[in-house]
Amino acid sequence: MTKDLTNSDLDRKNILNNNIAIQEVYRQVGFFGFKHDGKFRFTKQQLAEYFEVDIRTIERIVENHKEEIVDSGYEIYTGIKLKDFKDKIIDFVKKVHQGDYVPDTNVGNMVQSFENELDNLSKTPQLAVFTYKSFLNVGMLLTGSEKAQNLRSAILDIVIDVLNQKLGGKTKFINQREEEFLPSAIREYSYRQDFTNALDYYITENKFKYAQLTDKIYKSIFKENAKEYRQILKLNAKESVRSTMYSEILDLIAGYENGFSAFLKNEFEQLGRKLGLSEALILFNKYEQLTEATLTPLREKARSLMASRDLAFRDALHEKLKDYVHEVSPDDYDKFLGERSMDLEQRLEDNIDVFKRLKER
């Protein structure tokens, strides 16, 4: 779906939280600024020059979106912090002029900008300073600037390219790149076996019982049945629903399956007979009500993770969960795209000795 960064704070936050993509923006877009305390820093004047707008336009953007831009790294330098920044800028400009630092075009422009500001810097008691992320944040918000528009287009293209490079276009299975997916999938598989066994033992023969009770669990957790979930993720008939689910969802499904299996067994023992499917469906409603207080926090978290990640990673909107959509955290980007992530095939290969030992037990 088309993203308009000027109107969507969620899309802006998701991009700024995606450190993998931001590193690629550094490389392709450039404009690195002055390195100070480990980050590139820019003044309002430098942003105004880059975007070819009046400095008052930058100030209006900051004023209208203050909290967001502060979150992305904007701050006001005063006192010792300001003096340290000024001293380092003066030292930097001297080194360039003395030939101790050979400037490229970008550094040359930066020196010129600082020289134009040095008189004001020596007099001002405070200075607005932007990081690279807050520079990008301003570019995402700034209308009426062709350079800002070009920057937004470049950012969106880079985010898509990074996702495709990491996943080979297979966003359906991005969930499997997280290190917790494999152990969660193994646990859930075991509980699933116990669950289907319980349906066999305690419910009369009915070919619909597995699908209907599974859908009961899905709808309780994320408000969709299996068919609806498939349609949203565009899964084909051969693609397993659970192979696309995040570890937290699999863990919660396992909890439901294990809990309801025990609940169903207890009802069977009290009645002294198998339940019909209609009775089992009513019993699930009772189980859901009794566990409501316990499961609500876990269910709320699961809904938020599924809705937010699928919109950011898979461009898939769960309409029934749209109120649960939030920004994706930097940690999540690292889990699924960063150094901690890995193709499932590679993870299986790396753990083959563990699986062999389990098989031999």
Image (spheres, grey):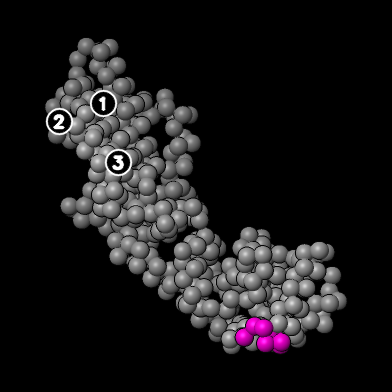
Which amino acid type corresponds to the residue marked 2 in the rendered image? Asn
Assess disc 3: are there few (<14), some (14-19) or many (≥20) residues with their C-alpha within 10 Å of its C-alpha.
many
Residue 206 numbered mark, or none:
2
User: What whole-number distance in Å separates the C-alpha atoms at marks 1 and 3?
Assistant: 26 Å
Residue 101 within the magenta-colored segment of the rendering: yes
Q: Is residue 158 above or below residue 94?
A: above
Nearer-the-camera pick, 184 or 345: 345
| Distance between the alpha carbons at the discs numbered 3 and 2 | 27 Å
Q: Which residues are magenta?
A: 96-102
**Contact (CB < 8 A) between labels 2 and 1?**
no
Residue picked out by circle 3? 185
Q: Upstream in the sequence, badge 3 or badge 2?
A: 3
Q: Earlier in the sequence, mark 2 or mark 1?
A: 2
Q: Main secondary structure of the magenta part?
A: loop
- Of residues 134 and 343, the one nearer the viewer is 343
Q: Residue at x 28, y 31 (%)?
A: 191
Q: Nearer the viewer, mark 3 or mark 2?
A: 3
Residue 237 position, x and y percent, is 18, 53
Q: Amino acid at mark 3?
A: Ala
Where does residue 247 sit, x and y in percent of width and height? 37, 43
Neighbour tally class for label 2: few under 14, some 14-19, many 20 plus, Cα within 10 Å: few
Residue 180, quarter of picture: top left
Residue 24: say if magenta.
Answer: no
Q: Which mark is residue 259?
A: none
Q: Residue at x 43, y 45 (%)?
A: 303
Q: Position of residue 43 (x, y in %)?
A: 70, 75
Taking 298 as reference, is 172 left or right? left
Q: Secondary structure at mark 2?
A: loop
Quarter of image, res 355: top left
